[in-house]
Amino acid sequence: MDHSGLPGSTNSVNQRMKSFYRLLRYLVYFLFGLSLIGACGLYGAYLYLEPKLPSIETLKDVRLQVPLRIFSNDHLLIAEFGEKRREPLDYEEIPPVMIQAILAAEDDRFFQHPGVDYQGILRAALQLLLTGERRQGGSTITMQVARNFFLSRKKTYSRKLNEIFLALKIERMLSKEEILELYLNKIYFGHRAYGIAAAALVYYGRPVEKLELSEIAMIAGLPKAPSRHNPISDPARALIRRNYVLGRMRHLNYISRLEYDTTKAARITAGLHTTPSEVEAPYVAEMARAEAVARFGRDAAYTGGYAVTTTIESRLQTAANRALRQAIQAYDKRHGYRGVAGHHDISEAVDQSALIALMADQPDVADMKKAIVTAISEQDAEVLTAQGESMTLDWQALSWAGVYINHDLKQAEPKQTSEILAVGDLVYLYRETPEEGEPLWRLAQAPGVSGALLSLSPRNGAIKALVGGYDFYLSKFNRVTQAKRQPGSGFKPFIYAAALEAGFTPASMINDAPVVFDDDTLEAVWRPENYSGRFFGPTRLRYALTHSRNLVSIRLLRKIGINHAVNYASRFGFDKRELPRDLSLALGSGVVTPLAMGRGYSVLANGGYYVSPHIITAIRNDRGETLYEANSIQVCDDAMELHAKQAVDQTDGGTAAQQKSAGEKNMPPPLRCAKRAITEQNHYLMHSMLRDVIQHGTARKARSLGRLDIAGKTGTTNDQRDAWFNGFNHHLVTTAWIGFDGFKPLGRGEVGGRAALPAWIDYMRVALNGIEEVLPEMPPGMVTMRIDVDTGEPVGVGSPNAIFEVFEVINAPKLPHDRDSDRTKESAATTNANPIEDPF
């Protein structure tokens, strides 16, 4: 019986199998054909797009946008400027665990695929077929590098093709390590952080090599969605993403089960951290920033990775900040309490966080703490600071606060706390170090008075410390460079130096007596007087300068002539156009900046040479190449001057080929020696006279430093509107100024020796620590003689009223018998001379 036609027969099965194989063969042909068409289409697309692809060569010489950074001379960070925070790292500097975390989160097959992960692309294609939606998928790290450096983030098919082709091209040109280094330095991590090094600093305030595993995983989870997975903006989502990264690391055996369990339980510790400035010098930073912008333009300066090294010494800058603030706080304390910063009803504030929130709008002030009064008793107060610290202010911290009336008056010191404070008051605290006892936090207030301190090297003008005000963030006005104030008696040394040049001596006598000037150049009849209101009669110039006698200075200026004085002052760097052409010049009625005063006093400190203050040592680009290096004028010894002259002669006399050869050898620039401004004899006398100001005169407080090599001059203007001290030794010149920006009087008794000198002393105590005392050597052409202390006339040995004085030989006074001898010789010469015959 034939069963071949039955459904279950062998022939039927064979027929179905043949049909299946035929269908399978057609499907293979179809798929092969489809693949071939796809490959041809892909190749065609490549041929079409390849000429339009950007050159990968730029990745070998990529210039990442890096902010401008300002450094001290000892290479501590002062400030950073720029929208993007970035700290580029070499591949070798990146911790291996960070690389593992990034690969686990972004591309675990990075070291296996050729730049394109076909498995990921197929997953993305399948998603498109199933849902009809284009979603991010299949992007390798190499493709992200291509997108971030060359393409937009717009999701289109053409961009994806470009991304794939670029990734393949990048993989042919760069190593895997080079690609990963580019990615980890370029990618955005949120909150202005670009690159993993910046992310570590922004979120944890530490370099990447010091991060914990939980922190590394948190950062590794950010590139996918820096805003959505951000630990600051959305801690809950960030925690989920961090734990996902940890899970991927565990799955890939990058971490152990114990590490995974322990780290997954760790809490979020991220917070926003600003760039950690290592030196507080915001006025310096602004000066350096302005210079960089002037050189490179704003956009380039903030993104070009320039590093500006300043002349600032961090130790001296810190001392200057503290010294000036202490002097300003001391002045403020002497003049009474102007009241609290604000007040809140704290009856509804049930916890500490609510109290701290009440201080949010109270301005921060430099080194002071904000606080709110939580309780008071008879002679103390309980306060809570904005940092969450509870403090007790005892009576020593409060009793100074007699109420301010005006710049000359304040009320008597209070008897109990309730006269000063009430619960809910917003106040400031200042950490004060009394002359005796331990440092304490006392009640304080935001200062109303301003100040400035400048310190520079007299050898080359390098600025070592600069403070332009109490707090840069409350007032960006730089009083060192911008405040034009009357220097008062601080200008007298330049008048005296001009007088010495004109033939006067330290022993010359000028009458200290009342005088009235009806000068057409002045607005009214002028009746100058000494600060004490007294008159002392004939006075030696040395003594007059030591005790800052105004009338002597005025008469001296009248004798030497205003034109001579103005011209001579210009040798110290003062602008003739800004100096008054009348006798008030003797009392410092012109307007100058503290910077100009520091420059002028440098001549008196360095032997008589003019140097120019400067604050930038070098500027380098992001590759460390030097774009600018200061070649400042400096005081040279004889050997240095000879070397400088020979270098100039060789440069001027060499052939073009020789000069080109020297340039190719990257020879250092020739030494620039400062020109002499005043004679060495004039300098020696002025140095000696200004040392007396400290040892015997208006700056005697500075003797507390225990040095004999320091010199300087106090300065006070009319109504005590400005208080100065300008002082120096061979190593440093330092100028301190105290005054109100609005030119209000400082108050009775607030002279340079009281208001400004303490800042100078506190700073120089630190700055001169370990610096050897050096006194200038007496130059040739000088002689020491005995003179009468009252008349300035030379006297013989044994005179009971004699002191020693130094003179230039050509201007030295003569003893009486020497003058008689000279007159006899002149008479004899006249008698023995041949008579002149009359030619007619």
Image (spheres, rainbow, N blue to C red):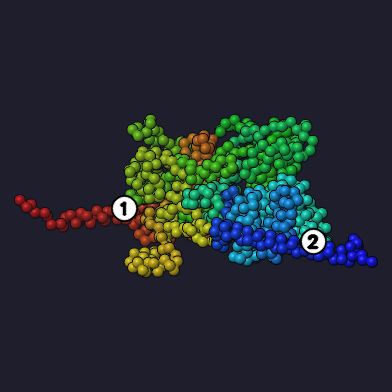
Q: Position of residue 642 (x, y in %)?
A: 38, 66
Question: Label for residue 103?
Answer: none
**Relative to 580, is 323 above or below?**
below
Determine contact: label 2, label 1, CB under 8 Å: no
Between the C-alphas of marks 2 and 1, the distance is 107 Å
Identified by mark 2, the residue type is His
Question: Which of these two is toward me, 448 or 823?
Answer: 448
Question: Which of these two is toward me, 283 or 56?
Answer: 56
**Sequence-wise, which precedes: disc 2 or disc 1?**
2
Q: Which residue corresponds to the image point at 15% horizontal and 57% vertical from the top-left?
A: 833
Q: Identify the residue under disc 2.
A: 251
Q: Which residue corresponds to the image point at 34% horizontal and 51% vertical from the top-left?
A: 501
Which secondary structure lies at badge 1?
A: helix
**Relative to 626, is 372 above or below?**
above
Question: Which of these two is toward me, 278 or 197?
Answer: 197
Identified by mark 1, the residue type is Pro
Count of marks overlaid on the render: 2
- Residue 262 visible to an observer of this rendering: yes
Q: Position of residue 206 (x, y in %)?
A: 68, 55
- Residue 53 visible to an observer of this rendering: no
Q: Residues within 10 Å of mark 1 (few under 14, many from 20)?
A: few
Question: Which of these two is toward me, 402 or 306?
Answer: 306
In front: label 2 or label 1: 2
Q: Position of residue 602 (x, y in %)?
A: 45, 53
Q: Identify the residue under disc 1.
A: 816
Would residue 798 appear left or right of 447 to someone viewing this image? left
Q: Position of residue 348 (x, y in %)?
A: 78, 32
